[in-house]
Image (spheres, rainbow, N blue to C red):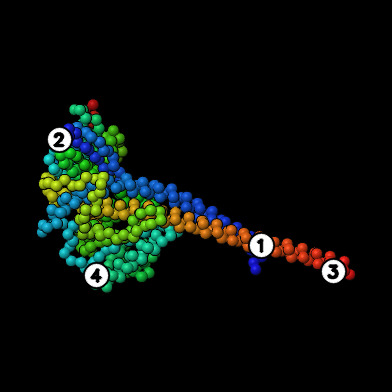
Amino acid sequence: MPSLKDLRVRIRSVQSTQKITAAMKVVAASRLRRAQEQAEAARPYAQRMQRVLGSLAARMAGFPGAPPLLVGTGKNDTHLIVVATSDRGLAGGFNASILREARRRIRELETAGTRVMILTIGRKGRDGLRRDYGRVIHDSLTDVGRRHISFEEAQEIAERILVLFRAGAFDSCTIIFNRFRSAITQIVTAQQLIPFPVTAEGETADVPPATVGVYEFEPSEEEILGELLPQNLAVQIYTALLENAASEQGARMTAMDNATRNAGEMIARLTLNYNRTRQAAITKELIEIISGAESLRAA
Amino acid sequence: MPDQVSFELVTPERMVLSELVDMVVVPGTEGNFGVLPGHSLLVSTIRPGTIDVYQGGTVTRRIFVAGGFAEVTPERCTVLANEALAAEELDRAATEAELQVIEGNLPSLREQVARASGTDRERLLTELARLERDRAVAQAKLQALAEAAAAR
């Protein structure tokens, strides 16, 4: 049976933990709103880019001179996995789910005989994979988008990847991140970046579909694609980073909400226990006094 | 056929402008082109320069863009710009300072590229390309400022 003092100390400590988790929840909620707005604002560009690229790529894919960013290098010996995580923890299963998916993919690729290269974004990704896959981690980036993710940062990452690609360091590339569905649900997504899969995914109701017809290209199709594809890589990374940022805050908000609730329950239980113990002590003292008086009177 | 073009200007970070206009003049890589309703299908790259938006025969907006792409159909003109800001917001002193820094860095970087090899060379080449692009943007900004001053 813990003493009254022990109980008091524990209640105090859980209370201060609860204060912290409640504050973190509020902070995460406001950051989540900002991250969502940013992701929303970035959508029009990505969708329109997809439309232009779609109409171009469909025509180019069959040509023998099509750029490797679109059709691949013709082999698949080395695969680059970009693991996008957060710098900070305490975000529920946010980082764990990304790492689980990354591990699964790496195992799968290695079993198939493909060499794997890893580029991690965020401290948690680096820390989580360093032990098992340290030898294949090519590079780790941290402090990406500390306050606000800018397109420029995404562009820098894209350029890093392109430098490796042009130097022939890998043949294909996938990015793993959490797609934001809601504050409660985030979906781990692995998206292929190189060669870029051309799908109709970007076409939604608010963007009119690409007009069917023969476009004129200024300058040539090859040159436009040559600029469009690297830009698109940056846009894909930017989108992934924004989704990830929103997911991180969403996951943290939910985790901290749970933690605050659990702390509340714990406080209630401890308080009940404390009051019972106190009551028991009072009762015991009363009994002692009364029985002492009783025995005096009897004597 | 509609008598106006639906003009959209988007950057990676946000939708800058979306409106119906009479005509836009876009600085394509191979020369400026005007877009009126009924323009033929076109995809073009854009060089750094100013986009002029016309309403009823006069320029209502001048927007500086730092390169990008344009997609034109008979009904619409979509400009995907890397960066966009109103021409009035250009800052001559800041741009000139920026240009000076860039031009100061270029020679040494060129030299490094000549000496490097392998992945290092690729990295330096990318850096060089970026710097040269920045220089072109800065030069275009100054030119846009000069044009604006001449028009006044």
Q: Would you say the residues marked 1 and 4 are in contact, meaning their CB atoms lie under 8 Å apart?
A: no
Query: Residue beneath label 4, please?
Result: A114
Q: Nearer the viewer, residue A120 or B70?
A: B70
Residues under labels 1 and 3: Cα distance? 28 Å
Residue occupying the point 37% across, 63% down: A97
Query: Residue beneath label 1, please?
Result: A276
Residue occupying the point 34% across, 58% down: A187
- Provide the secondary structure element on which disc 4 rests: loop
Which of disc 4 and disc 3 is earlier in sequence? 4
Residue type (three-letter) at the residue carrying disc 3:
Ser
Which chain does the numbered disc 4 sit on? A
Q: Would you say the residues marked 3 and 4 are in contact, meaning their CB atoms lie under 8 Å apart?
A: no
Query: Residue beneath label 2, please?
Result: B1
> Residue extending furthest right?
A299
Instruction: Say which mark, if any, is on residue A295.
Output: 3
Q: Nearer the viewer, residue A161 or B5?
A: B5
Residue A112 can be seen in this image: yes
Circle 4 or circle 2, nearest the eye: 2
Query: Crowding near pointer 2: few (<14 within 10 Å), some, many (20+)?
Result: few
Circle 3 or circle 4, nearest the eye: 3
Residue B130 percent location from the top left of the image: 24, 49
Query: Crowding near pointer 4: few (<14 within 10 Å), some, many (20+)?
Result: some
